[in-house]
Image: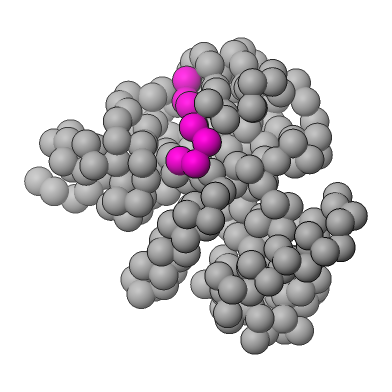
Amino acid sequence: MLLEIENMSLHYGRIQALHGISVEVGEGEIVALIGANGAGKSTTMRAISGLRPVSQGTIKFNGKDITKERADRRVIRGISQSPEGRGVFPGMTVLENLEMGCYTRKDKAGIRSDLDRVFGLFPRLAERRKQIGGTMSGGEQQMVAIGRALMARPRLLLLDEPSMGLAPILIQQIFSIITEINQQGTTILLVEQNAQQALSRAHRAYVLETGRIVKSGTGAELLVDPSVQEAYLGVA
Ligand code: ATP
């Protein structure tokens, strides 16, 4: 397993947001984490990227215990996050935003080829490389955020709500790009409220409810699971 989370709990002060969750992501997989508002999806991502300390349990990456490691060390190990709400630097150009994703790297040729990869996945960003980030549309900023995360050349890409706020046509597009990124060899952990798309694209998925994993299976299994359909797919 590339990522192994075992029995992880996390508190915000006295509020317990995660109650002993265990999640695994194998090399080459797309794994989705679905759940309602406040279920703990973003919290799980923050714990993996090292932005919030856990109160119990372990996080292993590539066999190594990283539970107590700093966030910047985890980026160097190959964990990169595209945060919810995008977090594009509004005063920087598209190109500068992308370059922020690889500030820890020195290999010029590698950076060049990763930039070409990002521009290949998102031709719109290539056209707009000099545009100021804050003036890009919501969908375009989402592309910038994913592109920036890819510039760290991650082994594990964490995507928090990539479809949030996007028009239906763009949702389709962003999910096809996610599949393409995965087919190019990047492992992906995806948090989504759009359960339909997430389960269709994911190899495996976990359902999170009030900080606990209540169900897991292949994307295909969960798509036809009656309780998942009722709660997350709008099927009565
Ligand atoms: P959404 O889909 O609405 O983004 P989520 O599943 O990502 O939801 P989290 O953001 O992980 O949910 O929140 C899980 C719980 O932790 C919620 O009850 C939330 O109110 C609480 N929480 C999150 N961040 C903080 C914080 N900084 N301080 C206190 N409580 C927090």
Q: Nearer the viewer, residue 189 or 226?
A: 189
Q: Is residue 27 magenta?
A: yes
- Residue 196 rendering spot, x and y as whole percentages: 28, 52
Residue depicted at 49% across the width and 52% down the height = 182
Q: Nearer the viewer, residue 198 or 210?
A: 198
Which quarter of the figure has residue 93?
bottom right
Which quarter of the figure has residue 107?
bottom right
Compared across the picture, whether 228 is left or right of 180 comes to left
- Residue 152 rendering spot, x and y as whole percentages: 73, 52
Give, as a single range, the part of the protein colored magenta.
22-29
Residue 172 is at least partly visible in this image: yes
Q: Is residue 118 above or below residue 81?
A: below
Q: Is residue 7 magenta?
A: no
**Residue projecting furthest to the left:** 236
**Residue projecting furthest to the right:** 106
- Residue 18 rendering spot, x and y as whole percentages: 51, 23
Residue depicted at 63% across the width and 74% down the height = 119
